[in-house]
Structure formats: C-alpha cells, structure tokens
C-alpha cells in the first residue's frame, strides 16, 4: 500500500541512482538491519535495486544522444593536385595546380533542431520507462515483503501447532499410563507431533527463502533484518472499481504510449525533412606552380533528390506511429480486463479472510474445546480429537494464505494504477 507514496520520492532516488551509475566504482548496496517495515524495504530497493541502477545508464545515454543531436556538421578540409606527372608541358610538376579548400555543409529545413527534438522526445520516453521500472520494483518489493510477513506468520502458527501436538501427546501419555487409553493412541499422538515438527521445519525453510528473496530486491546477498513488521490481517478499504479505472490512463504504462507517440511524430518529421537536400559551400586557394601565382576558388554543391527521396524511412516512421496507437489500444483492453479480474479476486480474498476469521476459526476452536472435553470424558475417540485439531489448523493456515493473497493482489492493482489505493477504515 506504499507504492504511490514511495513514487513521490522516486525522482530523488533516481537522481541518486544515476550518480551512482556514473561513478567509477559501485557503492555497497543498502542492507537494512533490525526490524524491517515496508517503507524501509521500499526505500532500500529504490536506492540499491540492481535493475534500477542498471537502467539508470539508459537515462545518461539518452542525454548523451541529445548532445550529439545538437552539434553542427563538421567542416571538411580538402587538398586537390592537378596537372602533374603527365606528358609534354605537364611533365613533372611544372604545370602543377594545388588547391586547398574548406567546405561546410549547410543543413536546410531545420534538420538539426528536429534531430534534437527527436532526441528530447526519446529522453522523455526513457524517463517514463524508468518510472515503469520503479513501479515494477515497488510492486515486487511489496509482494516479497508480504511473502516474508506471511512466512513469519506460518512459522508462528507452526510453532503453536507443534506445542499443541506436544501437549496432546503428554495428555495422551498420562491417560495411557493411567490405563484409560490404549498404547496405540500414544503412537498416533507421536506421529502427529512428528508431522507438526516437519511442517514447522518446512515453514522455517520457506521463511529463510522469503527473506533472501526480499534482500535480493536491494542487491544484498544476505538479509540483515531480523523481522518484517506488518499487520497481515489489516485489510484496508479500497476505492471503487470505477475510480480505479479512471486512474489507468494516468499510469506510466499509458503515459509511456503518449511519450512514444511524441517520439514517433518527431521521427516522422525528421524523416520528411530529410528529403530537402543540404547545400555544401566551399572556398579555397589555388596555386599555379608554373607562374607561381595564386587565386581564390569557391563553389557549392547540392544533391538531386531523383531516386532517393527518403520514402522508405518516411513510410517506416508513419507505420511506427500507427503501431503506437494500436499498441496503446491493445494495452488499454488488457489493462482493463486485468484490473477487473484483480479487483474481483481482491474482494474474494477479503471475503475469505472475514469468513475464516469471524466464522470458521471460532467455530473450529469451539469444536476443538468441546471435543477435548468429550475425549476426557470418554465420549470421543482420539481419532476424532486429532481430526478436529487438524481442521482448526487448516482454517488458520487458510486465513494466513487468504490475507497474503489479498495484499499481493492489492500490490498488483497499485502497480497497474500507480496510485494510492488505501484510506483509513471508518471508526
């Protein structure tokens, strides 16, 4: 839920990334320590994400293209030797004529300004691309942060399940020792405890993997944080679907199409003006060896646009411009369909969490308490007790999964709309 808030500081972070990318040596990546919040995770990723640091070079390259597009054509220095090493009067160098000339191409039609405009449009497009990469990083970090929080919850839940299996084994052991239950029930209780320990170790392994995946978001091979702090079951209210739909057009994913369209239009204008020929003016000095005299020479040249009128490049630029419109329409259709599916999935996840926590878990806990009391009185078998325990554990695990799914889907919606979606719940 921090994607849009973090986007406000993305420009400053991006400047930091560009400076780091231009430095001779890479600085050590940020690696948060202690208790980790989503805000700290996002900040670390924006500062040290390998993907963002690598893509920052694209901005520097685009700026360099503007510099190159702004320069004028270089003048040319020429030397021409005539009437030497021939026969008769032109034998040797007696009739040599040496011409030293300087020529300059004069671009007509504002070609240099159009080249610069195209390069500037390209820089805008690259900047939008960088913003989309930032959103990708924010969404990815949020999802991985949710994975860590959910994994921590599963470990805590697995430890409780192991403790429950242990207490059940001890209670069964006391009943077996008292001759109230057969030895087979203690064996089943040991099996249940073994399964709980295996699931606890599995949960701890998944937590380690989630921690490493999260720290990789800011380029650190080893996680330095101790725990990730967040309320997994804090499901905030979300704006209406229509409000989210209205935000789609303002997201960088669609702004980039407008920027790309400006780039394609600039390229089309540049391709069209290339049809106008450039003029080449030259001026120089000619020396006559035979008379030891010198004279000025001047001239100009201009290509004739008979065969090559840049028609292929103009046609390609027009096609690229039309393609941008087609791609924007296709992306709009896909984005709206994805947003609808994600919005429905998010509401379904919220309903799952509410049902599991408000109905299923209290009912399963009540059933366990009643079954345990009935088992102590001999009204229920050990198999029935274990079954009720497993049902309670299953609905608790399902609640964790549903809450994690809600936050992951919400992160995807935030990525799609690039806007702050949450607002405080009504008191």
Image (cartoon, rainbow, N blue to C red):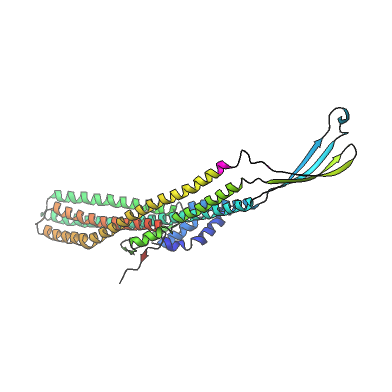
Q: From what the image shows, is residue 369 above or below residue 188? A: below
Q: Is residue 400 visible?
A: no
Q: Residue furthest top?
A: 87
The location of residue 160, given as percent across then percent down, is: 26, 58
The location of residue 267, given as percent across then percent down, is: 56, 49
Please report the residue visible at 21 percent of the width from the left and 51 percent of the height from the top.
Answer: 192
Q: Is residue 117 left or right of residue 240?
A: right
The location of residue 303, given as percent across then percent down, is: 67, 41
In this view of the protein, which residue sits in the foreground, 83 or 156? 83
Give the magenta range: 299-313
Helix, strand or loop for the magenta stretch, by majority: loop
In this view of the protein, which residue sits in the foreground, 6 or 311? 311
Q: From what the image shows, is residue 40 above or below residue 190? A: below
Which quadrant would the N terminus be assigned to in this image?
bottom left
Quarter of the image for residue 364 reads bottom left
Q: Residue furthest right?
A: 291
Which quadrant would the C terminus be assigned to in this image?
bottom left
Q: How many marks?
A: 0
Q: Is residue 14 visible?
A: yes
Quarter of the image for residue 22 reads bottom right
Q: Does 309 appear in magenta?
A: yes
Q: Residue furthest bottom?
A: 427
Quarter of the image for residue 79 reads top right
Q: Does 196 appear in magenta?
A: no
Q: Is residue 360 left or right of residue 4?
A: left
The location of residue 179, given as percent across then percent down, is: 10, 54
Q: From what the image shows, is residue 405 above or below residue 303? A: below
In this view of the protein, which residue sits in the foreground, 186 or 110? 110
Q: Is residue 134 left or right of residue 174?
A: right
In this view of the protein, which residue sits in the foreground, 367 or 83? 83
């Amino acid at each position: 839920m921090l994607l849009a808030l973090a986007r406000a500081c993305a420009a400053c972070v991006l400047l930091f990334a560009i400076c780091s990318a231009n430095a001779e040596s890479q600085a050590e990546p940020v690696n948060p320590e202690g208790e980790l919040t989503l805000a700290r995770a996002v900040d670390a990723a924006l500062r040290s994400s390998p993907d963002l640091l690598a893509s920052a070079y694209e901005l520097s390259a685009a700026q360099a293209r503007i510099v190159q597009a702004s320069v004028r054509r270089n003048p040319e220095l020429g030397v021409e030797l005539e009437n030497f090493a021939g026969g008769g009067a032109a034998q040797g160098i007696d009739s040599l004529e040496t011409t030293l000339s300087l020529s300059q191409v004069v671009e007509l039609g504002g070609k240099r300004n159009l080249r610069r405009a195209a390069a500037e449009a390209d820089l805008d497009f690259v900047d939008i691309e960088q913003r989309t990469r930032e959103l990708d990083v924010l969404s990815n970090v949020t999802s991985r942060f949710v994975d860590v929080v959910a994994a921590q919850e599963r470990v805590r839940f697995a430890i409780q399940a192991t403790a429950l299996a242990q207490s059940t084994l001890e209670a069964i052991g006391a009943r077996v020792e008292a001759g109230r239950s057969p030895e087979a029930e203690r064996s089943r209780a040991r099996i249940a405890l073994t399964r709980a320990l295996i699931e606890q170790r599995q949960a701890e392994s998944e937590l380690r993997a989630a921690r490493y995946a999260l720290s990789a978001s800011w380029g650190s091979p080893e996680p330095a944080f101790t725990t990730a702090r967040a309320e997994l079951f804090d499901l905030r209210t979300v704006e209406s679907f229509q409000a989210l739909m209205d935000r789609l057009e303002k997201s960088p994913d669609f702004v980039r199409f407008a920027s790309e369209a400006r780039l394609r239009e600039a390229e089309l204008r540049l391709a069209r003006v290339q049809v106008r020929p450039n003029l080449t003016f030259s001026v120089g000095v000619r020396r006559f060896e035979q008379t030891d005299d010198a004279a000025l020479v001047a001239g100009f040249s201009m290509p004739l646009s008979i065969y090559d009128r840049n028609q292929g490049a103009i046609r390609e630029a027009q096609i690229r411009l039309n393609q941008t419109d087609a791609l924007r329409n296709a992306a709009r259709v896909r984005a709206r369909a994805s947003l609808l599916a994600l919005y429905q999935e998010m509401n379904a996840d919220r309903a799952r969490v509410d049902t599991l926590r408000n109905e299923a878990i209290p009912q399963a806990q009540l059933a366990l308490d009643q079954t345990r009391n009935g088992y102590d009185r001999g009204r229920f078998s050990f198999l029935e007790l274990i079954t009720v325990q497993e049902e309670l554990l299953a609905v608790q695990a399902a609640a964790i999964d549903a809450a994690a799914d809600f936050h992951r889907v919400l992160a995807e919606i935030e990525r799609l709309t690039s806007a702050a979606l949450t607002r405080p719940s009504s008191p």
